[in-house]
Amino acid sequence: MALLEVNNLEVSFGLRSGGVKALRDINFKLDRGERIGVVGESGAGKSVLGFSILNLISNPGSITGGEILFEGKNLSKLSAGELRSVRGNRISMIFQDPMMTLNPVLTVGEQMIECLMAHRKIRKEDARNIALQKLKQVYIPSPETRLDQYPHELSGGMRQRIVIAIGLLMDPDIIIADEPTTALDVTIQAEIMELMLELCERNNVALILITHDLGVVSQVTQRTIVMYAGRIIEQGPTKEIINDAQHPYTQGLMNALPQMAVPGARLNQIRGAMPPLQRIPTGCAFNPRCDYVTETCKHNLPGFTESGSCLVACHMVAEMKREAAQAASLAQEVQS
Amino acid sequence: MIAFLIKRTLQAMVVMFVISLISFSIQDNLGDPLRELVGVSVSEVEREKLRDDLGLNDPFLVQYGRFAANALHGDLGTSYFFKEPALDVILKKLPATLELVFGATLIIVVLSVPLGVYSAIKPGSLLSRLVMGLSIVGISIPVFLTAIGLIYLFSIELGWMPSYGRGETSSLLGWDSGLFTGDGLHHLILPSFTLASIMLPLFIRLIRAEMMEVLQSEYVKFAWAKGISPWRIYFVHALKNTMLPVITVGGVQIGTMVAYTILTETVFQWPGMGFLFLEAVNRVDTPLIVAYLIVVGAIFVVTNTLVDLIYGLVNPTVKLAGGK
């Protein structure tokens, strides 16, 4: 049994202008110790996906369908108290901006100890010792002093280390990291990512890494989920997706990387912009921006096609494969 | 800390100088003190002589200089009506006013925090809507109308509460107070609620608005993700941040409340400074008026300094100049 299994998850936001579905038909599995990357443009629903796993979506949003099975328990059906015993304990989260994540009026120690005391019957001194250990694990210099400091006395990179340490406090099974390095200085980004990779590997923690950065995904994760307009459009082993993306959108993302551009030439980009959730086009949501669009794409929602070890939601995958094969055989004929 | 106190003391001296200048300069526009002082039967010559004796014919700056020099020695002039030092007259009435302000502050703190927090956590609930609706009503009704309404309902119709006066007082360490007798407390209830009626809705709304904003913040979301109890999130994580701006506004409002006591004390015949001030205005007792303005100004300055000190203690990101 997978550690985490998400089936047909649907998340909606009730707005005055009517409900909007932020996530639809989300299906994926996460094994113990596995690291999975979630990528896509801003607004694709990556963060909502991360928050929905712990049922942390704030009003007016809510989970309106599907199930999130964690060790067989459906997290979306748990009571508030049961959910609390999972949050920060079995599954913890790391947020985007460490400047905003820590409470400015509580010391680092208070914010760590309260988490331990919420989940374990433990004396304050013991909790403090555990907090100290975790700070050492994330390589914080002079951790004893840090415990009594307030967040504003620490740098951004230091604060994110503390947030990671809080995430690790209860030795969780899963860490959900929502763009953990986006708000940091470029020089710190690599350090923090390396630290997270090291800690996950050492403690056998599964990681859901939500990010824009395909480079990070390829270094850290084993599997990748690509999202577009609230749906998963491609998922599979990270290597296959990076080296041989099937979906035209994923291909576009890969081509948009600055490394892929010819030096001196304009950078590649996917034309157009992601549609707002209220006006998602019929058929394949990507069809207005797609180079391979056909009539079918405009009317029918594509199901998943298996391609290698990947699942791809595109009508044209088979077509494109056939074309590629034809071209290859043609080239062979010409050669012979 | 010491540097902070020195700086604030210097600032306070400048503020007090400006207050004294302004309050002293308006006294000429309040009416002729002679008329109240001597009545109609005194001849113009005698009046002119009295004016000279009182120094009322001197140039403004000379008058102010004399006043300021005396004020620095703790002498704010002698009340025309009471024939006593104006400061003594006011300080005698100060305990009654402070008790009233204390009672109102207590009501505001005890009610506004739970009501504000509750209506921020459950904005859609019936109680929240009721509180929000009533608070608009509370802000809109003038103090004297609230006072008359309360007297009509609780004193006349129901007969539960005394309608005027301070009741029995007892002396504790030289402080003549109504806080330690049942009768005194009984008399304090209606005036306190009246005085609180303007500020209470303001504070409920302020706390609610601040709290709602804080509850949307990332660190509260993160606290939820840590799995700690809602009680701790609301009252430790959120409330502490909510109170920072509330403390600042609160300090200014306590000062304002001292000023509002004029209306409340008048309606309830409460023998405090505000009531005294109104009488002094009617009698054109200019030394008393000036002294009152200066005392109230001093109260403002002291409360604001205290509030800044408290703010520095609550908010770790604020370091008082020269502090740790």
Image: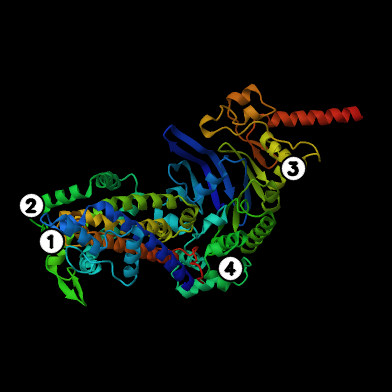
Label 3 CA crowd tier, 10 Å (few <14, some 14–19, many 20+): few
Foreground tag (3 vs 2): 2
Q: Secondary structure at mark 4?
A: helix
Q: Nearer the viewer, residue B59 or A104?
A: B59
Foreground tag (1 vs 3): 1
Q: What percent of the width, then of the height, locates residue B29?
A: 27, 51
Q: Which residue is mark 3?
A: A258
Q: Which residue is mark 2?
A: B156
Marks 3 and 4 sit apart, C-alpha to C-alpha, by 36 Å
Q: Which residue is mark 1?
A: B165
Q: Are marks 3 and 4 in contact (CB under 8 Å)?
A: no
Q: Secondary structure at mark 3?
A: helix
Q: Earlier in the sequence, mark 2 or mark 1?
A: 2
Q: Secondary structure at mark 1?
A: loop
- Pointer 3 and pointer 4 on the same chain: yes
Amino acid type, mark 3? Pro
Q: What percent of the width, then of the height, locates residue A321?
A: 74, 32
Q: What percent of the width, then of the height, locates residue A192?
A: 65, 58
- Taking the view exactly as shown, the residue that stands out farthest to the front is B45
Disc 1: host chain: B
Residue at image point 36% right, 60% down: B61
**Residue A41 seen in render:** yes
Q: Are marks 3 and 2 in contact (CB under 8 Å)?
A: no
Marks 1 and 3 sit apart, C-alpha to C-alpha, by 81 Å
Q: Which residue is mark 4?
A: A135
Marks 3 and 2 sit apart, C-alpha to C-alpha, by 83 Å
